[in-house]
């Protein structure tokens, strides 16, 4: 046993939930599919750097759309 077992899977799960939209179950499922497909693609093309590629794309997507792909936009009215 190792104390860091499952750490990468947990981080990818968190990234999938944030990519789909926090609190949105269908969005989290779609985010999980997108992260999984991108990870498989990156593992085939960039063997040692697949996690880096996944998290760079994740970071870019969150910078463009901070609420996630299916997140709600809220309007603050004073």
Image: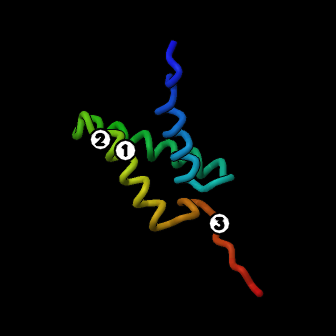
On the image, numbered disc 1 is attached to which residue?
38
Q: Residue at x 50, y 22 (%)?
A: 5
Q: Is residue 71 above or below residue 6?
A: below
On the image, numbered disc 3 is attached to which residue?
72
Q: Could you tell me residue 16's position as x and y percent? A: 52, 46
* Label whose residue precedes the other's in the sequence (1 or 3): 1
The local crowd at label 2, few if under 14, some if 14 to 19, many if 20 or more residues have their Cα within 10 Å, is some
The local crowd at label 3, few if under 14, some if 14 to 19, many if 20 or more residues have their Cα within 10 Å, is few
Q: Residue at x 29, y 41 (%)?
A: 42
Quarter holding residue 44 = top left
Of residues 74 and 25, the one nearer the viewer is 74
* In-image side of 57 versus 15 (left or right): left
Q: Look at the numbered discs 1 and 3 and tell me whether their residues touch, using CB distance below 8 Å.
A: no
Q: Residue at x 25, y 34 (%)?
A: 48
Q: Could you tell me residue 69's position as x and y percent? A: 53, 60
- CA separation in Å, label 2 and label 3: 29 Å
The local crowd at label 1, few if under 14, some if 14 to 19, many if 20 or more residues have their Cα within 10 Å, is some
Q: Residue at x 54, y 34 (%)?
A: 10
Q: Is residue 53 above or below residue 1?
A: below
């Amino acid at each position: 046993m190792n104390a860091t077992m499952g750490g990468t899977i947990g981080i990818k799960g968190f990234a999938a939930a944030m990519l789909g939209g926090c609190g949105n179950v269908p969005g989290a499922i779609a985010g999980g599919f997108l992260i999984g497909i991108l990870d498989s693609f990156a593992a085939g093309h960039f063997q040692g750097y697949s996690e880096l590629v996944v998290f760079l794309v994740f970071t870019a997507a969150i910078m463009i759309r901070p609420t996630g792909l299916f997140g709600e936009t809220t309007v603050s009215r004073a």
